[in-house]
């Protein structure tokens, strides 16, 4: 779809990327890479295990390479095989090696929020740095929790933010209380070190849990590596002491990434099938296909994949609560203008604290595209409309780039600034979009 080469995980395309509209209905069958969220969780569990594990179908992107880099800097043996999408990890049996090396979590929220509890298991001091965008994201919940376990955390610039020095100590098992309405990554990071604590871990949430499927995913990955987690009530998690067992673990295709080609069929017409995206799955974002079905698309899920077909009469609007699959909120936002009536998205106020303020960013860019958007405390209402030519700003947010590119498949004159930012989670995205459009 463009003469420019696709971005690599370590480079960025600087010039805006024009998106060429498709000339007719789509007809494509594609595959998406492994789940970022599952890959990084499996990397942590494998690193803490008592032997060698193999992750099959793993994602290779900036976020997962950041996690791999942290493990390597800690002295663990990690072997990557990009040809087979495999990662082999030799675990440390829950005893994180001591090192004076600095650890760079880059722009990766999962890496940052999983690494800090991991370091609490170590016997040394660890300097944790991050990209300026990640430094702006709050870390107080993690800092306070690992301090309560007996580790020491010293913020080096701004209180409650990276960079910081984490010093492991003689950890004690105790009850930890934390809010459930901030990032679920805080809770997941703490849960994953639970089996390595002397008496396990008990976590109680002080508020309702948002992004619940991501915590369910964490528990599922932990259990695949032999951990035992109990939930006596919806706000309590009890992790038994023990150890992770090495395993061969298969990573599911990324359901968030799959939302883009599936949405393309809904707004451009025709059909798109994503191979390997099936239910049941441990990713909550598989629910996005159901949203498209409610809006009027024909959705089929079988044992081999998920397919979306546009139907006569087009899409209709409605109100959708995306509390538990918020990573698809930007995808739904760019589908909304093509519906026959307004689309209201609720339950996503917490995404203001993601890579950027995603509520404001979506509203700003859709407005620049000529689409009417009303913002409220936990989402938007987006009116039907025809996008006008615009260079879309992406705010260093991979999901802004990937979602808004879909507008350009259906409308003239859309270009994406900083297209290389997709390397954070999906370095091959522009190739995939070309295949969806029938150009690859």
Image (cartoon, rainbow, N blue to C red):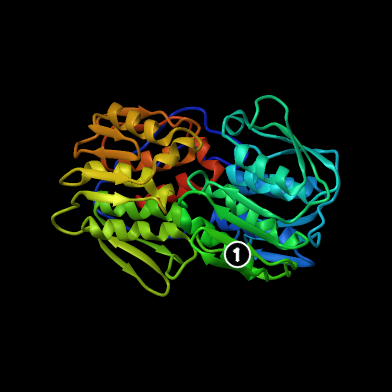
Tag 1 residue: 221
**Residue 200 image offset from top left, x and y in percent:** 71, 62
Placement of 417 over or under 425, stated as above or below: above
Placement of 311 over or under 21, stated as above or below: below
Q: Nearer the viewer, residue 252 or 189?
A: 189
Q: Say which quarter of the image contains residue 237.
A: bottom right
**Residue 336 image offset from top left, x and y in percent:** 26, 44
Residue at the location (85% across, 48% down)? Answer: 123
Query: Residue extending furthest bottom?
Result: 303
Residue at the location (60% across, 59% down)? Answer: 58
Q: Is residue 396 left or right of residue 400?
A: right
Residue at the location (28% across, 56% down)? Answer: 292
Q: Helix, strand, or loop for circle 1?
A: helix
Residue 419 in view (yes/no) = yes
**Residue 151 image offset from top left, x and y in percent:** 77, 44
Residue at the location (46% across, 48% down)? Answer: 431
Give the crowd class for mark 1: few <14, some 14-19, many >=20 residues within 10 Å. many
Residue 32 in view (yes/no) = no
Quadrant for the N terminus in the image: top left
Q: Say which quarter of the image contains residue 236.
A: bottom right
Q: Nearer the viewer, residue 162 or 312?
A: 162
Q: Nearer the viewer, residue 176 or 341?
A: 176
Query: Residue extending furthest top?
Result: 157
Q: Nearer the viewer, residue 317 or 415?
A: 317
Placement of 204 over or under 406, stated as above or below: below
**Residue 31 image offset from top left, x and y in percent:** 46, 60
């Amino acid at each position: 779809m463009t003469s420019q080469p696709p971005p690599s995980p370590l480079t960025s395309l600087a010039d805006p990327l024009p998106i060429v509209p498709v000339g007719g209905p789509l007809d494509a069958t594609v595959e998406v890479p492994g789940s970022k969220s599952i890959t990084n969780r499996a990397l942590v569990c494998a690193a803490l295990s008592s032997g060698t594990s193999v992750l099959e179908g793993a994602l290779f992107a900036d976020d997962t390479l950041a996690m791999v880099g942290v493990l390597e800097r800690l002295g663990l043996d990690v072997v990557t095989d990009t040809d087979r999408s495999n990662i082999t990890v030799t675990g440390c049996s829950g005893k994180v090696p001591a090192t004076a090396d600095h650890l760079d979590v880059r722009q990766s929220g999962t890496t940052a929020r999983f690494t800090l509890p991991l370091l609490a298991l170590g016997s040394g001091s660890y300097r944790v740095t991050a990209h300026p965008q990640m430094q702006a994201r709050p870390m107080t919940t993690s800092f306070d929790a690992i301090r309560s376990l007996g580790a020491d955390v010293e913020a080096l610039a701004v209180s409650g933010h990276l960079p910081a020095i984490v010093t492991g100590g003689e950890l004690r098992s105790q009850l930890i209380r934390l809010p459930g309405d901030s990032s679920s990554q805080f809770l997941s990071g703490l849960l994953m070190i639970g089996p390595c604590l002397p008496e396990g871990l008990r976590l109680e949430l002080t508020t309702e849990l948002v992004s619940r499927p991501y915590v369910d995913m964490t528990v599922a990955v932990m259990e695949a590596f032999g951990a035992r987690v109990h939930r006596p009530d919806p706000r309590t998690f009890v992790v038994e002491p023990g150890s992770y067992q090495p395993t061969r673990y298969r990573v599911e295709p990324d359901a968030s990434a799959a939302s883009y080609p599936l949405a393309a069929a809904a707004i451009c017409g025709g059909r798109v099938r994503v191979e390997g995206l099936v239910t049941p799955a441990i990713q909550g974002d598989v629910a996005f296909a159901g949203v498209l079905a409610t809006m009027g698309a024909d959705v089929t899920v079988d044992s081999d994949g998920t397919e979306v077909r546009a139907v006569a009469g087009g899409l209709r609007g409605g109100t959708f609560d995306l509390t538990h699959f918020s990573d698809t909120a930007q995808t739904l936002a760019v589908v909304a203008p093509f519906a026959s009536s307004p689309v209201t998205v609720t339950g996503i106020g917490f995404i203001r604290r993601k890579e950027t303020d995603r509520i404001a960013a979506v509203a700003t860019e859709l407005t620049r595209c000529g689409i009417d958007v009303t913002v409220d405390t936990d989402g938007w209402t987006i009116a039907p409309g025809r996008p006008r030519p615009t260079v879309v700003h992406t705010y260093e947010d991979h999901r802004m780039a990937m979602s808004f590119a879909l507008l350009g498949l259906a409308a003239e004159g859309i270009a994406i600034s900083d297209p290389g930012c997709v390397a954070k989670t999906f370095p091959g995205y522009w190739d995939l979009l070309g295949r969806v459009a029938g150009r690859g």
